[in-house]
Amino acid sequence: MRLKARTAMALTGYAFILPTFVFLIWFMYYPVYQALSGAFTYWDGFNPPAFIGLDNFRRMLSDDVLGQSTINALIWVAFAVLLAVLPSFLVAELIFHVRKSRWQYVYRTIFVLPIVIPMVVTILLWRFVYQGDGAINQLFALFGLEHWQQLWLGDPDIALYAIIFMGVPWINPFNLLIFYAGLQSIPKEVIEAAKLDGATGWRRVLRLDIPLSLPQFRLIVILTLIGSLQNIIPPLVMTGGGPGYSTYVPILHMYNVSTVNGEFGYGMAIALVIFVVILAFTIVNMRLVKSDA
Amino acid sequence: MNQNKFKRVWPIAMLVPVLALGACSDGNGGANSGTASSGGGGRAEGGTWTGTITMYAQAYTPNAKNISGIQAEQKMLATLAEAYEAEHPGIDIQFVDEEFKDYTQTVRVKAAAGEMFDVFWGQWADLNGTLPKGIAVDLTPYLNAPNPYLPDQDKWVDAMNETVVNETVAPGGEHYNINGDYVATAFFYNKDLFEQAGIEELPTTWNELLALAAQLQEAGIVPMSQAPDYGWFQRHFLSDFYAEEYDTIAGFDEAPGVSSKDEAVAIHKGILSTGDERLMAWWPIFKTFTDTWKPDYLTADVAVVTETARNDFLAGKTAIFYDGSWVPNLARDAQIQFELGSFNFPILEPSVTPLTNGLDVSGAVGGPNAAFQFAVATKEANKTMKEPGKLEAVIDWLHFIGTPGHVEQVVNENGTFVPTWPGTSPNAEMKELAEQSTQALRVVSIGNSSANLLKDIQRTFGLYLSGNIGLEEATESVQKALDAAQNEYKTKNDIDFSAY
């Protein structure tokens, strides 16, 4: 009887979560399974796929565009991590050190408010800023610095960096809040003790705040790594991967070979490798965060 | 212990039906996924089917609110649909009012999901090569049979433009669309800016075009600023340079026109290859012209910047814009503040290059690639086409709009293109551009043997024109792309090049 009641309760519980499971499997795991199996096929996206073994993976090894894309992605990730961490942490520190909590609230709001602007809008805005007659070049002209004017998105030596560095002053509201929360969680006793020991100003930041914010640093670094590898929108909207292949990244290559060239099998093979790389980063992330929990 | 075991096993047991559901899926998003392309049920037997026929008519979409460049009052297809519906109770024609930024991609995705529109805009080159085989119905049997709305013709094809029908045939002899109009391309120019620069005569030769650009520059006017579309400009030059070898190139598949097979074989045989000086010789010539352009968009992706560049022109920032005959409509929508004119792509003189045959190739970019290009979805691309009698109903609707009279009405109401079927004539204001449609379609170009070839060369083209790489590096890069394309074609089509 008791077993029956427990079973009924368990059944009820599982019935509640069943819809979530169905959608989770249907929309998250089933596509992964499709990509996994499709990576070993030639598939034009319409006719039945033909099994070709490891051919797609062999092709990846000799794919010059993928090679160039990978180098671009590594450069992107390196700068993205720096831009994700440094400005946000600096601003979080500044806000944390504002004496009145009311003003802290005001500054937090000011820096978080831009989150309401959709990313595509920001990107399109920056496309105009970077144009030959855009705001940057006009500013240079205003100050008599015409020789600094560039084709920001038209020069293959500059375009990648132009995309990476768009969004001045690079303060990510999420990262800012994570750092701020981390600073807030430092016990007051520790801060007071540090003060007595003479750790103030930059010394306090270096000796106390940064070491005690390491879990936040690790989390943001890993999330940025993953986010950068998945970020297709800026190169797609701003340059289409050009000039040449100078702003091409693996995720854009995957998108183009699949939906533009109709080589879905090869696209799935690239997606599978990206998935494995991101999974590896995620596992590293989980372990790092866990170790500090 | 037993309870614990039960607890461990139960979640797995719950997963089984869920996974089974997944396994039952057809791989296209689910067997029961909605079919957006058609509403209404079907009734069995040809001629008695009733329901909704969906049609994506691109530039001819009536009452369009979401497609740019279409006049708000355009309604001819809706009028024809009303007349057809009145004659065929139970049939409802619905037009898709949507603008697709990447139409080829849309077709791929919709067809993969089995949700393609019943009748859709499809250009012959895409249907013959770029898109996966099996998306569109082979209309050849219908073309060779009578059209009930043309009682005087033995075959429907007799009412169509013979040259167009012959040149747009697929390598296997199939016809995947009915092709009723022609698009012209030209240099559109700002008459006010030309007047300001003191330009009185329009250029007819390449050197005159260069002189005109220089004159505009001297007057402080930007002659042009747009992404140099390799796919377009190559056709002018290659059609001229390779004119004497057109029959050889077009003849590999023993069918009219340069098909993707012809192209792949010509690449393999070294004709359409960098080993033949004609393939790359026009790049430095063209660069003398693009050197006068504003450099902003030279390296840009054509799809990404064309609209911005066109808007620059319509805003009066640049003097010339090379585009299709839809520009006057867009200019009207933009309420431009200047008078718009156009002139054709000029003739190359022997003093420019000894490779020229001095031909008028102004019509090489345009052609039967406009908007009255309608295909019918297969039952694989559109699940509702499995309904008994629906294919016949859809073909009957196509028969109805596919008469010279209706083609002329639909095409001329839009005012952007030229009707091509015998007995039709263009609007008076299109007469100048319509001259291009009378030129023989002897176009040589590359890009159809592989989906990626054109995009790949476009990237190199931009880098070369902007001065980021030299001709030697560009040539190497192009040859690499050509080699990859012919290998891809060989793999996909199991062709033995040595047989040609």
Image (tube, coloured by chain):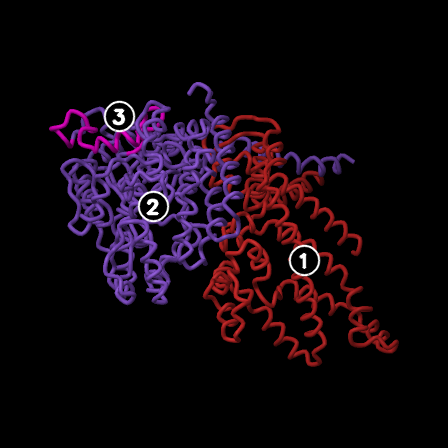
The colour with which the image depicts chain A is red
Farthest residue in the right direction?
A: A197
Residue under the image location 47 percent in, 33 percent down: B275
Mark 3 to mark 1 CA distance (whole Å): 64 Å
Farthest residue in the left direction?
A: B152
Label 2: chain? B
Label 1: chain? A
Which badge, 3 or 2, comes first in the chain's sequence? 3
Work out whether B484 lies above or below A279. Answer: above
Q: 10 Å neighbourhood of mark 1: few (<14), some, or many (≥20)?
A: some
Residue annotated with mark 3:
B45
Magenta-tinted stretch? B149-177
Mark 2 or 1, which is nearer the eye? 2
Q: Observer-nearest residue: A108 or A138?
A: A138
Q: Observer-nearest residue: B444 or A195?
A: B444
Residue annotated with mark 1:
A81
Which dot marks residue B351? 2
For the stretch drawn in magenta, the main secondary structure is loop
The answer to if B24 sits in the magenta stretch is no
SS category of the residue bearing label 1: helix
The colour with which the image depicts chain B is purple
